């Protein structure tokens, strides 16, 4: 890439910074909480904003039956394509659905307030920011007005918080897109090539209700559940020895995040349900992980009362492992990020799970890179006062524009 081309990209991005921030703010102000997962309205708003920027938007409505089967109310995936010339297709994927705000905010979660250079709002960092960074990187390439060797697609999807099956996976299964390379939402201070997998199990412990004055006439589901949880938490300590060799991943994890049950204070609980989250490092086998947990829970249940159990899989997200060919993406991103950020930016793994796995499962080279601060903790991702440093939005967009221009032969 010539210095003149790079300078023209930077000039365009500098001149459109206010427009890009307004674009992001409009997305943050439109709720897209998942659950409940009624996200079609946000997709319409995003499509209107993108169309106003001169982009052609394809809206792909996911069938209602499939949406409901995935625990959502509505979902529409957006695909934006621009062909510059013959060559590979590079897709950029970000998700517009977000976790509910929760409590503890000092700013309006849908206000997009800017305080000391940070924009606040649910989804501003994960990952509506990359709707903005990817869109304006594409617009910057278009502004060059020169032929390039390939095409850019934006895949803007709405079910990442529910597993991605009716977002990226659906777009690929329906042959709506067949990209050669993919960059997915991430943070600007690392290029991610691997991440954890995740298993969600729901365990239902069944007893028999009885009057609290005569508890021995029932079967206490909560007592049985307590024993199962005690065994699970004792076993969890062993996960500290299962550490990934990939930088940034760390050890395997297990969390019991949801529990409910009982009828009333004066009734022996007849049923207790809990859900657990098991994070798998890339070196683990998902089938073996699930089998181990099921066996442990069944054994613990058998040691206690005559309560029955049912175990149901809610989610199985495969780990992301480096895909052959992804080094072409990561090398270019690391080089430009190092230059723009003024510090060495390398590749790493993260202990999250993302939609990237759906592309990797089909053998498509993919890495994660996008706008955001150094860590998810600094971004307050999935907690109160989620925020994004606007300077990092600027830098990430510049890195993406320079990288895409290089990969398409500018």
Image (cartoon, rainbow, N blue to C red):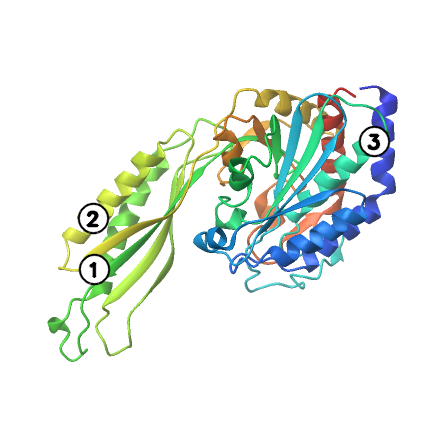
Q: Is residue 118 something that shows in the picture?
A: no
Q: Position of residue 243 (x, y in %)?
A: 40, 32
Query: Which residue is identified by label 1?
Result: 224
Q: Secondary structure at mark 3?
A: helix
Q: Are marks 1 and 3 in contact (CB under 8 Å)?
A: no
* x 51%, y 39%: residue: 169
Relative placement, left or right, of 399 versus 304 is right
* x 76%, y 43%: residue: 391
Query: Which residue is identified by label 3?
Result: 9
Calculate the distance from the C-alpha at mark 1 to the C-alpha at mark 3: 63 Å
* x 25%, y 65%: residue: 271
Q: Is residue 311 something that shows in the picture?
A: yes
Q: Position of residue 81 (x, y in %)?
A: 70, 36
Q: Position of residue 280 (x, y in %)?
A: 40, 37
- Residue 298's disc number: 2
- Residue 328's disc number: none
- Please name which of the two marks, 1 or 3, marks the residue nearer to the observer: 3
Q: Nearer the viewer, residue 202 or 154?
A: 154
């Amino acid at each position: 890439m010539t210095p003149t081309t790079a300078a023209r990209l930077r000039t365009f991005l500098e001149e459109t910074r206010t427009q890009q921030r307004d674009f992001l703010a409009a997305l943050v102000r439109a709720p897209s909480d998942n659950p409940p997962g009624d996200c079609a309205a946000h997709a319409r708003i995003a499509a209107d904003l993108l169309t106003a920027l001169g982009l052609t938007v394809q809206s792909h409505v996911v069938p209602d039956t499939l949406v409901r089967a995935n625990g959502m109310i509505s979902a529409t995936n957006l695909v934006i394509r621009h062909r510059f010339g013959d060559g590979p297709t590079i897709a950029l994927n970000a998700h517009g659905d977000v976790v509910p705000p929760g409590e503890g905010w000092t700013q309006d979660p849908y206000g997009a307030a800017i305080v000391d250079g940070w924009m606040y709002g649910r989804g501003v960092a994960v990952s509506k920011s990359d709707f903005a960074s990817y869109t304006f990187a594409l617009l910057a390439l278009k502004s060059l007005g020169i032929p390039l060797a390939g095409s850019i697609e934006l895949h803007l999807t709405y079910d990442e918080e529910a597993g991605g099956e009716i977002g990226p996976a659906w777009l690929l299964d329906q042959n709506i897109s067949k990209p050669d390379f993919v960059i997915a939402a991430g943070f600007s201070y690392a290029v991610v090539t691997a991440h954890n997998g995740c298993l969600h199990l729901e365990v239902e412990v069944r007893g028999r209700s009885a009057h609290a004055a005569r508890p021995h006439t029932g079967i206490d589901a909560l007592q049985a559940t307590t024993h199962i949880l005690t065994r699970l938490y004792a076993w969890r300590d062993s996960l500290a020895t299962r550490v990934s060799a990939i930088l940034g991943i760390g050890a395997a994890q297990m969390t019991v995040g949801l529990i409910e049950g009982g009828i009333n204070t004066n009734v022996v609980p007849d049923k207790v349900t809990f859900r657990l989250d098991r994070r798998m490092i890339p070196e683990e086998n998902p089938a073996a992980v699930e089998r181990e947990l099921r066996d442990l829970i069944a054994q613990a249940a058998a040691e206690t009362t005559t309560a029955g159990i049912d175990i149901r899989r809610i989610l199985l997200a495969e780990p992301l492992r480096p895909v052959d060919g992804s080094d072409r993406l990561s090398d270019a991103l690391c080089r430009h990020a190092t230059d723009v950020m003024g510090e060495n930016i390398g590749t790493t793994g993260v202990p999250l799970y993302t939609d990237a796995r759906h592309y990797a499962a089909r053998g498509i080279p993919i890495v994660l890179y996008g706008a955001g601060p150094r860590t998810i903790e600094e971004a307050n991702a999935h907690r109160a006062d989620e925020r994004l440093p606007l300077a990092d939005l600027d830098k990430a967009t510049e890195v993406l524009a320079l990288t895409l221009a290089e990969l398409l032969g500018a």
